[in-house]
Image (tube, rainbow, N blue to C red):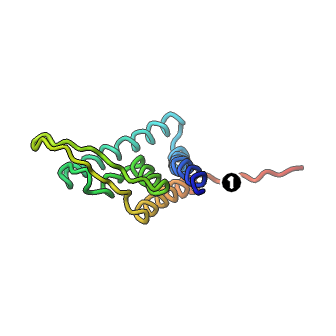
């Protein structure tokens, strides 16, 4: 019975986070092209940095460092959606050195941490836009 609400919530998470960050970035840039480039760069760079940091700290074990795996814009969206939908991933993992195939169960990251990071990013985006954009009063005569 909760499936429709979960699907709507899962669809709203990326829209809210992307929109708030893009509005904040575009408020501070002169052209739409620059805003798109900055946002795309931050999206991909945070994904690369979080993946490298996770690989170094967890030695490449997928079941370790759940929060570290999700420390990018796409990772936060994925972690929140995994919690909203209640998904536990089951992965078959092959280790080259050992030659063993394992079934890994990867639970969703902590919802409190994911919500805190996601809400903080959304607030930063909206605050950046609010600091730059001044409201214009329209007077009807």
Q: Residue furthest right?
A: 141
In front here: 141 or 61?
Answer: 61
Q: Residue at 30% x, 46% y: name it.
A: 91
Question: For residue 39, what is the image quadrant?
Answer: top left
Q: Which residue is mark 1?
A: 135
Q: Could you say whether the residue bearing mark 1 is in a helix, strand or loop?
A: loop
Circle 1 residues within 10 Å: few <14, some 14–19, many ≥20: few
Q: Does residue 8 appear to the left or right of 139 in the view shown?
A: left
User: Which quadrant holds the N terminus?
Assistant: bottom right
Q: Quadrant of residue 114?
A: bottom left
**Going 83% across and 52% down the picture, which residue do you hit?**
139
Q: Nearer the viewer, residue 23 or 11?
A: 11
- Which residue occupies 53% across, 50% down? 10
Please report the residue visible at 54 percent of the width from the left and 36 percent of the height from the top: 32
Query: Residue 84, how many percent across, how many down?
Result: 49, 56
24, 11: nearer the viewer:
11
Q: Position of residue 108 (x, y in %)?
A: 38, 57
Q: Residue furthest left?
A: 97
**x, y percent for residue 47:** 34, 45
**Where does residue 52 sit, x and y in percent of width and height?**
24, 47
């Amino acid at each position: 019975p909760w499936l429709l609400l979960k699907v709507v919530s899962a669809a709203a998470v990326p829209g809210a986070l992307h929109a708030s960050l893009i509005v904040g970035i575009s408020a501070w840039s002169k052209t739409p092209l620059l805003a798109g480039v900055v946002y795309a760069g931050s999206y991909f760079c945070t994904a690369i940095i979080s993946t490298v940091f996770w690989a170094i700290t967890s030695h490449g074990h997928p079941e370790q460092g759940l929060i570290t795996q999700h420390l990018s814009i796409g990772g936060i969206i994925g972690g929140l959606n995994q919690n909203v939908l209640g998904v536990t991933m089951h992965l078959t993992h092959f280790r080259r050195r050992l030659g063993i195939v394992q079934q890994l169960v990867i639970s969703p990251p902590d919802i409190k941490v994911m919500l805190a990071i996601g809400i903080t990013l959304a607030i930063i985006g909206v605050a950046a836009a609010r600091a730059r954009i001044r409201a214009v009063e329209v007077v009807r005569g």
